[in-house]
Image (spheres, rainbow, N blue to C red):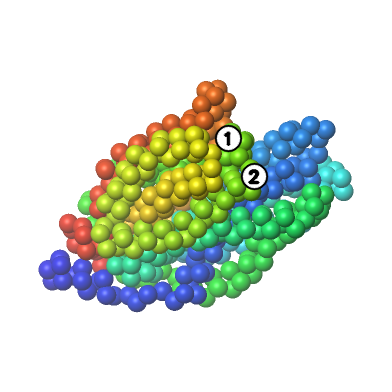
Amino acid sequence: MPVAEQNETILKARNGLPAGQVAAVVVGNALQFYDFLTYAFFATQIGRTFFPSHDPTSSLLASLATFGAGFLTRPLGAMVIGAMGDRVGRKPAMMVSFALMGAAIIGLALTPSYAQIGIAAPILAIAFRLAQGFALGGEVGPSTAYLIEASPLNRRGFYVSLQYATQDAAILTAGLMGLALSNLLSPSQLDGWGWRIAFMVGAAVVPFGLIMRTRLAETLHDGVELDVDLGPAGFRPYLKIAILALVMLGAGTIAAYVMSYMTTYATVTLGMASNLAFGATVTVGLCGVVFDTLGGWLSDRFGRRPVMMIPWAFLLVAVFPCFWAIAHYRTAWALLGATAILTIPGNISSSSVLVSVTESLPRRVRSGALATIYALAISTFGGTTQFIVTWLIRITGDPLAPAWYLGAAVAIGLAAMTLMSETAPGRIGGAIKTSAA
């Protein structure tokens, strides 16, 4: 059969995934980002609960260090749970990661304060953060591999984009939850139990997520391999993909965490009102929900490479003017408008990056390799970006310092994108393999 006819046949081989199955897969990513931002919002209250000190800064630093500890175990979770997805199946790996994630969130929310149980309180808090990092490290690989393997070939980009869209929906939800609790409760109530409510709201979805995941069909051994032909087998071709993926995902992580830093940047560096600065977080969430899925749809229609590269090139050009406008005008329109302009290109591009990397990996190592690459990118760059940005502002005294760091990351990421091959089915030069692998 000619290549064009073969590709067309395979493109029609699968119907769309039911909404319930999609929700079961992406709920893990949503929960991890909800927890991430919730912890960031209530880091001060958590610090006073588990790490009381006469110096408020010491309490906060201990709380942030505990938050950062979760990044340390992500690569380990990626190697263990991600590899489990390749050996045992995507579904069991997703069940393990989500159950462990839920247990860690509930455990942290219910841990008594230092005043109640002494040194055991911070020990438990750190243990739960380490467990959660381990679980999160193993979540992305199996769940993204599942979406790639279960979705129609000509809609892979759209389905994978739901990973990011639900993350941003969770960011929006966490932002609204933080705003509501901070307005409804007194400072003493927030310290005593208010922050725990925010975590328990996220934990409430855990039983439903587990039930939904039990109903998923396994894709690891479904008998049909729908991957692009990457040429001769061997380690070397995948080493190149792994390096490029680490660079691209690292650049995307830096961009995402700089955007998450905008609220702190506006209040601490620029001295803007906190309620105004908080709108930056809501803007990031709203833009993500809309433009993540648009990026996935565009990558199915026009290919992965152009949808990766064109928005990223626009972002490179926009970084410095946007930060200059925020620092110069310090108004709501400048902050929210520039945040949107910087967020949207990354949203459109990110889905193409993730689906391109996933499509480039063979099924037999897809879950573990993707989980490990993603976890290394998040741990290395996600855990350090906001610290580096704060440090750069401090040593330079320049409010545009974040733009230099973000601009450098975008330029390096764009260079890596130019070296990636096109992987969208129907737009690649080779045939699509239909033999089991």
Q: Which mark is residue 274?
A: 2
Instruction: Say if residue 106 shows up in the picture.
Output: no
Badge 2 amino acid: Ser
Is residue 277 found left or right of 155 in the rendered image? right
Query: Which one is in front, 290 or 22?
Result: 290
Q: Image point 25% across, 67% down: which residue?
A: 434
Q: In the rendered image, is residue 411 in sight?
A: yes
Placement of 398 over or under 214, stated as above or below: above
Residue 297: give x, y in percent of width and height. 34, 63
From the top left corner, tell me how far across and down residue 278 is, in percent: 60, 49
In the rendered view, would you say 106 is above or below 380? below
Tell me the element at label 2: helix
Dots 2 and 1: beta carbons under 8 Å?
no
Secondary structure found at label 1: loop
Q: Is residue 6 left or right of residue 124?
A: left
* Foreground residue among 373 and 29: 29
